[in-house]
Amino acid sequence: MATLNKLSKRMCILIKKFKKTVLALTLVVTTAFSAIPAIAAVNFKDVKKNDWFYATVEWVVDNDMVAGYPDNTFKPSKSVSEAEFLKLLIAAYEPVQAGQGGNWADPYYAFADKMNYPTSGNRNAAISRGAVAEIVSGAAGVNYKGDNAIVYLLGNGLAKGKVAGEISVGGYKAKDLLTRAEAVQFIKNAKENGLDELSKRPANGSPTNQLPKLPEVAKPPVAQVPPGTPQAVADIYNALLKQYDASQLRVDQTGVDVRGSNNKAMVTANYDANTGNVAGIIIWDNTVKGAVDAALAMVKATGAPMTKEAEFKKAIENGRTSGQAVEFRGSGWTITVEPHPTLVDNTRIIIDKP
């Protein structure tokens, strides 16, 4: 009997040790946005006082909303998944706890589904700033999509955009992936600008005539180009001046050239008087150093959403041997890279604007 009692006591001790071990492991296995012991923002190795996000990171850490990584970093530039952003937004307002038995994100998606928030269901994929605009505006109790969701956020102080001094849909950069620094800034904006609670998103779209008015974005001055130069050409010229010296550019009523070291045009953007836009770009010799980069700069200067830069450059390179055209589509735009049928070093880029 005494032997049995000793065995029972020993089993109790082992069980207690096992429970402590499991508890310790549970505390260690956590997501990037979980409340592991907070480190003051000033002590994060990758968060400096002159960073634009310093005060915001300090604010969320002080409020126990997020924590850093075990290596004493915050990783402000790391992209955020849809599940991580949902957790961050919902946990800032509601006492929803991460799932213990199944996937940790299940309770947050259940809440989002109940509130009719738009989610892709692709939990681990990096979320775009455009998708965030639709979720956050939905949490404010309206149902807007795309640019309208962005206008709602900007006009109500729930976002500030990424271009300094410019409050515009373009400056918001909807195609960019959300970073950790931007994610916490969204939460701070919401908390400080009237989003006192999470509302249910209406089933039907909200009236667009109720959207706030954004300040108009000033057009680049035409005075920098010869008289009679179309505005579309002037816009591209002024955009290229941020990257090229004026001596490398030639501009007139027909378009803009970027010139090489021999002072010959290596890339030309041609103006189409019928559409009032720059509808085509010609790379005169795609083997010349800098020609492909100049063509990419021109495409961006038209306002076209070019997110696949590496693929764009590859299409120009491959076109020299394949002779096949490649299309890039996005936000209603179509950009076609079309090799010349006989001149292998010559490439035409056709831009169809929505």
Image: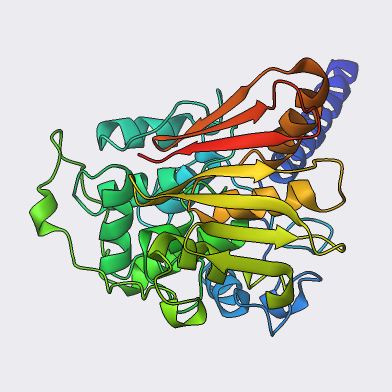
Residue 300 coordinates in the image, percent (x, y): 57, 52
Left or right position of 179 against 322:
left
Residue 222 coordinates in the image, percent (x, y): 42, 76
Q: Foreground: 346 or 143?
A: 346
Q: Is residue 221 above or below residue 287?
A: below
In the rendered image, the quadrant that contains the N terminus is top right
Q: Residue at x 70, y 60 (%)?
A: 258
Q: Residue furthest right?
A: 3
Q: Foreground: 335 or 46?
A: 335
| Figure coloring | rainbow
Task: Please indicate, yes or no, whether residue 178 appears anywhere in the rendered image.
Answer: no
Residue 23 coordinates in the image, percent (x, y): 71, 40
Residue 113 coordinates in the image, percent (x, y): 31, 30
Q: Foreground: 107 or 115?
A: 115
Task: Please indicate, yes or no, whether residue 300 appears anywhere in the rendered image.
Answer: yes
Q: Residue at x 48, y 53 (%)?
A: 303
Left or right position of 124 against 284:
left
Image quadrant in which you'd find residue 263 = bottom right
Image quadrant in which you'd find residue 70 = bottom right
